[in-house]
Image (tube, grey):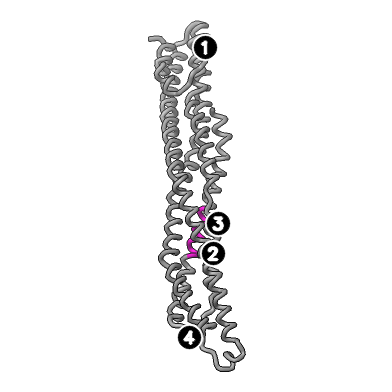
Amino acid sequence: MSDDDRTASLMTPARLAQLKVRPTPAASPAAWLDQLATDAGSGHIRRLLDLRGQLLALLQGLSAATAGQAATELAAALGEVDFTLLQPRGWIARATGKGKEAAATFQARCDRCAQAGERLAAELRALQRQQQERAGPLERTALECEVELKAIEKIMDQGARWLQDMRNQLKAREAAGGDAATLQKIQEDSRRCELLVARLKQLRAASGATQPAIEHCKALPQRGAALAASLQQALEGGWKDASRRLDRLCEQAGGGTAAEGAEALRQSLPALADALQQAAGDAQALQSRVQAAATELTALQEPLQAAA
């Protein structure tokens, strides 16, 4: 088998189909091999470009900012509830109407809590819809990207082995010498090696830039689900009970009766507010991760386009 035949055997029609490359008819086998060296992996790169656009579109519909703001507002409203307004008033306060004024102030602050709770519940439902609509497609698209990256990695490994084999042949052929035609073929094969070296560098740059962006995208659905679960727990496990107890205290204060259970509720609200603040922090962190992932995907345009 000649050196040219041996080189061509490493780039068979089956290999060409695997690379998803469809070059125009070349003038010679040597030109065909040059094109293979230049275009290796281009089909996978073009697919990554398409998937990158899909991921960006999916990220544009993800937002945790408003849910975090709603959690912060409810925590702040809870902190403004003043249980001293429920303390028993003397006959002078009752005569001058200050007792009713205190009850009205307490009612107004409880109303702000109720409004904030309603908004948070609405934002939680929106966040859950986001998860249902986008988490699955986001995970599947990221998985497709990983498949393409693995294919590119395989091409780079095969290309490195091809280079090593070709360079070993070139050394042997150079040592053997030959006529002008033989030396011309050696020069052509050396140039072809350099073409493949440049191509592998492009693939490596594209793969190296894509991998972390895909990993970050993969983590977003799980973080979104965790945020929704923590907000759900704060609403169902804390706020729902606190809301009922606040309503009962407002009724008692409005009727001039003793505020039963006020102290127990006062002691429990800080823990609920802390849980809401923690969820708000998680929402802010998730929003930052979404924005960072979008920035990474935007930056991928250049290395992927260069290798396409």
First to last magenta residue range: 276-286
285 in magenta:
yes
How busy is the neighbourhood of tag 1: few (under 14 within 10 Å), some, or many (20 plus)? few
Q: Residues within 10 Å of mark 3 (few under 14, many from 20)?
A: some
Q: Nearer the viewer, mark 2 or mark 1?
A: 2
The amino acid type found where label 3 is placed reads Thr
Tell me which amino acid carries mark 4: Thr
Q: Nearer the viewer, mark 4 or mark 2?
A: 4
How packed is label 2: few (under 14 Cα within 10 Å), some, or many (20 or more)? many
Determine whether label 4 and label 2 are within 8 Å by CB: no
Dot 2: element: helix
Q: How far apart, in angstroms, are the residues tagged by discs 4 and 2? A: 32 Å
Provide the residue designation for mark 1: 26
Marks 1/3: CA–CA distance: 58 Å
Q: Which mark is residue 72?
A: 2
Rendering coords of residue 57 (x, y %): 54, 40
Q: Residues within 10 Å of mark 4 (few under 14, many from 20)?
A: few
Whether the magenta-drawn stretch holds residue 58 is answered as: no
Q: Are marks 4 and 3 in contact (CB under 8 Å)?
A: no
- Which secondary structure, mark 1? loop
Instruction: Determine the image quadrant of residue 136.
Output: top left
How far apart are the alpha carbons under marks 2 and 1?
65 Å
- Which residue is denoted by mark 4 in the rendering? 257
The residue where tag 3 is placed is 66
Question: Which label's residue is closer to the chain start, 3 or 2?
Answer: 3
Badge 4 or badge 1: first in the primary sequence: 1
